[in-house]
Image: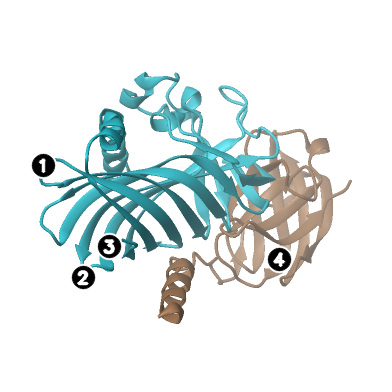
Chain colours: A brown, B cyan
Amino acid sequence: MKKIIILMFITAVISCKEEDATPTGPINDVFDPTTATLLKSGTLVGIGHTVSGTASLYESGGKKIVLLDPYDSQNGPDLKVYLSKDVNASSYISLGALKSITGKQSYEVPGNPDAAEYNYIMVWCEQFTVVFGRAEIKK
Amino acid sequence: MIINVIVIMIRIATLCLSLFIPMAIVAQQSPSTKTKSIDLGLGVASSQGTLSAAYVYDWNLGKKEKFIFGIGGRITTYVGANQYYSTAPADITSGSTGPGVFFKEDIVENIDTFLIAKPRVVAFNTMINLGYKITQKISLGFNIDVIGFSVGNKTQGNYINGSQGQIVEAKPTAFNLLLVSDNDLGSLNSEFYGKYKLNEKISLKAAFQFLFTEYTTEIAVQQFPEPNDRFRNKSSMFSAGVSFHLN
């Protein structure tokens, strides 16, 4: 009886909704970095997950753009792109859902923040509050 | 929509509770049968669940002893996955405190979100039980936690305010207190239940459970309209359990 109750309890708790996985098809956004000013850039490193590529912060037409090019990672639920002030994402701007787990992809940064304050670009599994990968971006 | 209905039900029940408090005094002064029981319950909902254990001391009131008034203590263990917590304090959610909050709608623009991947809360509360015996075997009732404390590990959560956010640590709010509506503090459990008496020792219990759990962030992450570090999750779930009658 005790085992049945524990099993029911665990089943109920871990029976999550269907995972909101990121698209897997290759992407090639049209953003042309040669027409923009590179502010900061860094290499993406996986944190407990497979993530690789280059993350850059550009300014173009008075807007800030984050570019992941190249980009490759394993898939996961609810992956988001964050522009963060520090390594712990204790203050970040969400750029929205990761468009694809592979290929060149650009994200407009809302609010046009001061680039000097933001030092990390992160791929974050929001649902589980887990960082997938990050790049420390520098001039 | 369902949550709103449940909140209204809880509000009505809370009002009823205040009307029934004099029953406690009557119960102690008038002859009545007293019963003691231990209730064990398992509540489940999508990505969350509870285990609860309660000791309840009931007075059976009225000529036919059909009315039940009881007090007791309850331990509720809450486990969830990827649960969204919302701004808790009534002065932010409703723009005021006091009993008037009962009738006020939430101010949507004041309510921010705190996402916790693995909320785990253990709440120790005193509780009040109200019931009515429909037959010798079937009774219906409502119980609600009143005051107590909560424990739980510190955990990381994601404060989300539009496109802005912060990853911060939080702990279950330590002090629990039933007040009115969003004035409540901490983690409080309540149930609308039905019991079926199998024999003199055991009853089966089915309940609709409504549970508040609350976390306090290590810093006041919310700044508008005023600094706030308290976030509440309102869970509704069905539960099943057993009552062991001790006399």
Q: Is residue A30 visible?
A: no
Q: Nearer the viewer, residue B193 or A112?
A: B193
Say if labels 4 and 3 share a chain: no
Q: Where does label 2 land, which residue? A: B198
Say if labels 2 and 1 share a chain: yes
Q: Chain of mark 4?
A: A
Distance, label 2 to label 1, CA atoms, is 24 Å
Answer with mark 3 or mark 1, whichever residue precedes in sequence: 1
Count residues near mark 2 (Cα–Cα under 10 Å), then give few for <14, some for 14-19, many for 20+.
Answer: few
Q: Where does label 3 land, which residue? A: B205
Mark toward the viewer: 1 or 4:
1
Mark toward the viewer: 4 or 2:
2
Give, as a three-letter code, the residue at label 3. Answer: Lys
Q: Chain of mark 3?
A: B
Residue B76, horizontal then vertical, whole percent: 47, 55
Count residues near mark 1 (Cα–Cα under 10 Å), then give few for <14, some for 14-19, many for 20+.
Answer: few
Q: Where does label 4 land, which residue? A: A71
Give, as a three-letter code, the residue at label 1. Answer: Lys
